[in-house]
Image (cartoon, rainbow, N blue to C red):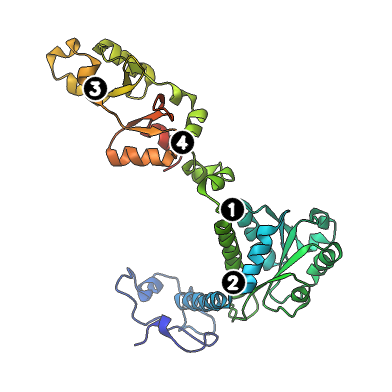
Amino acid sequence: MAQPWDDTRPLATMRIDATAKKPSSALTSDKTLLATMPEGIGRHHDSPTIDAVSSARETIAIEIAGLEALAASIDANFAHVVAMVQACRGRVIVTGIGKSGHVGQKIAATLASTGTPAFFVHAAEAAHGDLGMVGADDLVIAISNSGESAELQAMIEYCRRFRVLLVAMTARPDSALGRHADGILRLPEAVEACPLSLAPMTSTTMSLVIGDALAAALIRARNFQRDDFAKFHPAGKLGAQLLRISEVLDRRPEFKEVPSVGPGAGISDIIASISRGRMGATVVLDGGQDIVGIVTDGDLRRAMSDRSVFDRTAAEIMTPDPRRIASDRLAVEALSVCETQRIGTLVVTDADGAAVGMIDIKGLLSLGIA
């Protein structure tokens, strides 16, 4: 039996067989899932043999076909738009109406967070004063599948009057929008996944994806790096994962306090230093303040098995050449070292190798980087 995803019939008429055998990796069959549903749930009203799973697969298949057509349609026009945006001295203003407007908001947000100053202007609001947000050095990306949205007319006329660069994201380059555009992000003609052929589904997916493709091309063209990305994402888990250890030390001044003893320190001094530092360890520094070792709680416990422990010095019970990490490395790298090396504490060093801080796995996890 042919697999549902191998059906070669036109996508507009395809009905996927929900009873077709699926890969053995599937944990639960459609029949089992449907048996747990109340009567009438997950069924089309006009065709009880087509269930929700089949409908979902068909929708996805139609939209995949649209994306495949989009990928095949990318040509020099796309490269031209990338060059236009890269050369823009102002900001990128994305505009649209309805579902295209929602997609436009996401595109503007993605561009802004990846090094291209951008924001969204609602097409209907533009004619009521928001056109004042558009400057002569800016570039407008107008989204309309048909290219004939009446609400875009004010933006089109404004761009023509003040010679503002206009990029049209449309399936119809010969439309009112396309004819007045300086660049085209063309959307191929594709079947809408909506069963009624009314709600934009495939077209909005293609708009969203070509927006991502534009942002990705600009990231590469500008050599946008993780450090650049971190500037725009200081909050949340993502921001924490991009923190450098030097920034962690600035945020948590207590990490800059390095508990330390000399090589000749006795057990009582070692215990006192570990207790003051609250890191479960103390660094051993020689006379020149060079790091020669570290004494951890574990080192102390092992040393306590010998009755002569109170006659021993830090140099005798320390772990020599302790793990350390430079302050310009990412905090997530420090966490990785702690986990892979099975250690709880890392000494932070500056460019000269001097100890400038100490971080432990508990403190790193409290930053939300895991």
Quadrant assignment for the C terminus: top left
In percent of width and height, residue 10 lies at 52, 88
The residues bearing labels 2 and 3 have C-alpha atoms spaced at a distance of 61 Å
Residue under label 4: 328
The amino acid type of the residue labelled 2 equals Met
- Residue 114's label in the rendered image is 1
**In the figure, is residue 183 to the left or right of 52?**
right
Lower sequence index among marks 4 and 3: 3
Quadrant of residue 168 within the rendered picture: bottom right
The amino acid type of the residue labelled 1 equals Thr
Q: Please tell me whether mark 2 sits on a helix, a strand or a loop.
A: helix
Q: Please tell me whether mark 4 sits on a helix, a strand or a loop.
A: loop
Residue under label 2: 206
The amino acid type of the residue labelled 3 equals Met
Q: State whether residue 40 appears in this view.
A: no
Q: Please tell me whether mark 3 sits on a helix, a strand or a loop.
A: loop
Lower sequence index among marks 4 and 2: 2
Quadrant assignment for the N terminus: bottom left
The residues bearing labels 1 and 3 have C-alpha atoms spaced at a distance of 47 Å
